[in-house]
Image (tube, grey):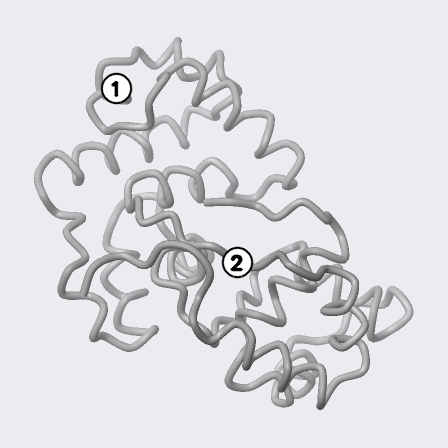
Amino acid sequence: MSAIYGKPDYWDLATQELAAVDPVMAELIASYPNVSLEGRGEVFHTLARAIVGQQISVKAADSVWARFAAHLQKIEAQRVLDSSVEELRVCGLSARKVEYLYDLAKHQQAGLLDVALWHDLDDEAVIAKLVDIRGIGRWTAEMFLIFYLLRPNVLPLDDIGLLKAIALLYHDGERLPLGDIRALAQKWQPWCTVATWYLWRSLDPVPVEY
């Protein structure tokens, strides 16, 4: 099975079912018609973009990524490896993230990011494969599940934006304990990815693309 491009085939069903069980979701879904998560089908691009976005705001990540992409001109492993540490740091990347991007590029060059066999693995098994790569933790792996594999039921509980949106929309701005968030998310099953995407939209109407 090859990478998925464009809108996931489950999206329309998911939005219908989420809107039926959750009034907050119904309002969000109605507020953002004719847009959806879209697959890019570029594994190195997706993982590099997720690494750049680790532990910083979406706005900051967009700014750093724009400089990084402009420097490389094309998002390719060899172009990363051909860049000096200084050139990448000027883009706004931390020294640690530069190390991670070099390591990711080396994995790509060595053929270790061939995900052809990953499509039949469940989400946790894919995460286990990815976190073996330096610099990729659970959050980054979950972004890969969402934006590359388009898995329908990912709930990234380490995502700052998701937690903020849930606090604002469901608890008057107060951050809920993770156990309460998991309980809230039960009604989003099996479409937690879709719910997460719309909660992100409540904070930033422009969809993030990894």
Q: Which residue in the rendered view is the most extreme toward the right? A: 172
Q: Which residue in the rendered view is the most extreme toward the front? A: 34
Q: Callout 1: few (<14), some (14-19), or many (20+) C-alpha neighbours within 10 Å? A: few
Please give the count of numbered marks on the rendered protein: 2
Numbered mark located on residue 44 in the image = none
- Give residue 99's quadrant in the image: top left
Mark 2 and mark 1: span between their CA atoms? 28 Å
Residue at 63% x, 41% y: name it.
58
Judge whether 57 appears above or below 89 on screen: below
CB atoms of marks 2 and 1 within 8 Å = no
Q: Position of residue 47 (x, y in %)?
A: 35, 44
Pick the front one: 105 or 31: 31
Pick the front one: 179 or 57: 57
Pick the front one: 158 or 117: 117
Residue at 57% x, 59% y: name it.
36
Residue at 79% x, 62% y: name it.
31
Q: Position of residue 21 (x, y in %)?
A: 71, 90
Amino acid type, residue under disc 2 in the picture: Leu
Residue under pointer 2 = 37
Judge whether 17 appears above or below 86 on screen: below
Amino acid type, residue under disc 1 in the picture: Arg
Residue under pointer 1 = 79
